[in-house]
Amino acid sequence: MDAQQADRYVAAKWDDEIVPQLVEYIRIPNKSPMFDADWAAHGYMEDAVQLMVRWAERQPIPGMRVEVVRLEGRTPLIFIEIPAAHGGRDDDCVLLYGHLDKQPEMTGWDDDLGPWTPVLRDDRLYGRGGADDGYAIFGSLAAILALHEQKLPHARCVVLIEACEESGSYDLPAYVDHLADRIGQPSLVVCLDSGCGNYDQLWCTTSLRGLAGGNLDVQVLEEGVHSGDASGVVPSSFRILRSLLSRIEDEDSGRILLDGLHAPIPEERVAQARRAAEVLGSAVFDKFPLLPGMRPMNDDLAELVLNRTWRPALSVTGVGGIPPLDSAGNVLRPHSAVKLSLRLPPTVDGKRAGELLHEALTRDPPYGAKVSLALEKAATGWNAPAMSPWLERAIDEASRAFYGRPAMYMGEGGSIPFMGMLGEKFPGAQFMITGVLGPHSNAHGPNEFLHIPMGKRVTASVARVIAEHHLASERGETTGSAVAPDSGQRHGDHGCC
């Protein structure tokens, strides 16, 4: 590959076509089904699908077949088949993955920004979903087009763009089974839905945490009563809830107390965390909008990397039963509820974690209170198989070619349920998990943005890796080159990034 030629081609494709398409995509409030129960009736998901399909069908890739697959009662899936070209192999396969559904609006956007209002400012495109993960279909096809522009060989490619990743990818297994014969056995999986430690080099994800969580509710009364009359007699539902959370989390350190929710950290991942900490420095934590005077949970940067990638951690992401401050009277409330999001080490079984969480929180309720935990998510994470030498070389060469710096490897704290499922179905596949979600890009939150230069370089890097995949395939290095580790991990029921 001529790296300079590929760089120019990809940059022009982004500037002339991809960024304008993403501007229109951001305008569509196509929230994932978990956040829009009437998504089918509202039609926004279909609008996003059609926008992407129309663009894909215009791309001059010989023999490409673009199809919207629809299974009864499920969100749609864009399925693209691209035959091998310029001497590439049809008996090998590269699978490229992304999603088109979005997180909800979230409060806190700057006055001149908004979730459905695309704003181009310098190198950033603000708005919900551009980086997570609207760019994936455009980047995937642009990478393949860059190969065709230089008449470089590539294997048969399959592109999957799902529409319920932010709800846990619960529809995707059915589609993968439905399309199994057409997908075949990919030897390389490229996922464009992950993060990057900085925008200065190519980052590849080596592991993803799992997720267990749901709604914890504590009830003590049938109705609210005067707090002056009842306090000291009727226990506060909030105090009971607080004591239940102390069963699973040390409130001083944040350490999760249930041994079954921890897992050994492989030495390779510890070494990668140390290297990432050296490269990132204080960016490990100062990418977050900390208030003045706030400090991170540990002074050791490598430990912070491991905390967010290989250790369990609890977040309370919602509260119920508690009135807002401006309407809170002197009332001892009948119940308190919180939404729990428990991140799990990559190799901890999500279903078992949910069972442990339920047992710890609901056994022997204090004062005989009514305690319930409605589990919504139980997803196992993912730990990458050992990387083949050809792929490690290809990724590093791509990073040096398009960034001028070596590639970096690090786990991610979020979850991509599809990865665990693919790891089970294709144990011989190699994985390139990368993305554009870097410092301050704030996926899922206010002021989310896509770093456009990063999108261009990731696209060019994927093209380079696909080209190297062909050479490795010709040498017989892609068949059965990796076996998934015997970690006991299974794809969980639900989960989301």
Image: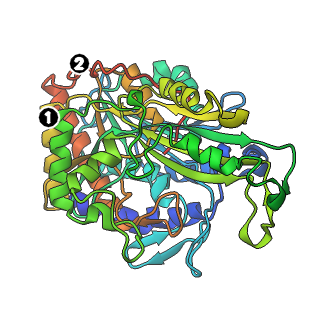
Q: Percent x, y for residue 349? A: 43, 25
For the residue labelled by badge 1, is the local secondary structure a helix, a strand or a loop?
helix
Give the residue displayed 50% in from the left and 67% down from the top.
20
Q: CA distance from mark 2 to mark 1?
A: 13 Å
Relative image position of residue 358 (x, y in whole percent): 58, 29
Residue 222 visible somewhere in the drawing = yes
- Give the amino acid at mark 1: Trp
Front-lying residue, 106 or 184: 106
Residue 98, given in percent of the width and then of the height, sits at 46, 44
Q: Earlier in the sequence, mark 2 or mark 1?
A: 1
Give the labeled residue for mark 1. Answer: 390
Most extreme residue toward the bottom is 112
Q: Which mark is residue 55?
A: none
Nearer-the-camera pick, 153 or 327 = 327
Residue 324 against residue 172 in the figure, above or below: below
Residue at figure coordinates x 29%, y 35% from the top left = 431
Q: Secondary structure at mark 2?
A: loop
Residue 490 falls in image quadrant: top left
Q: Quadrant of residue 394?
A: top left
Q: Is residue 250 above or below residue 470?
A: below
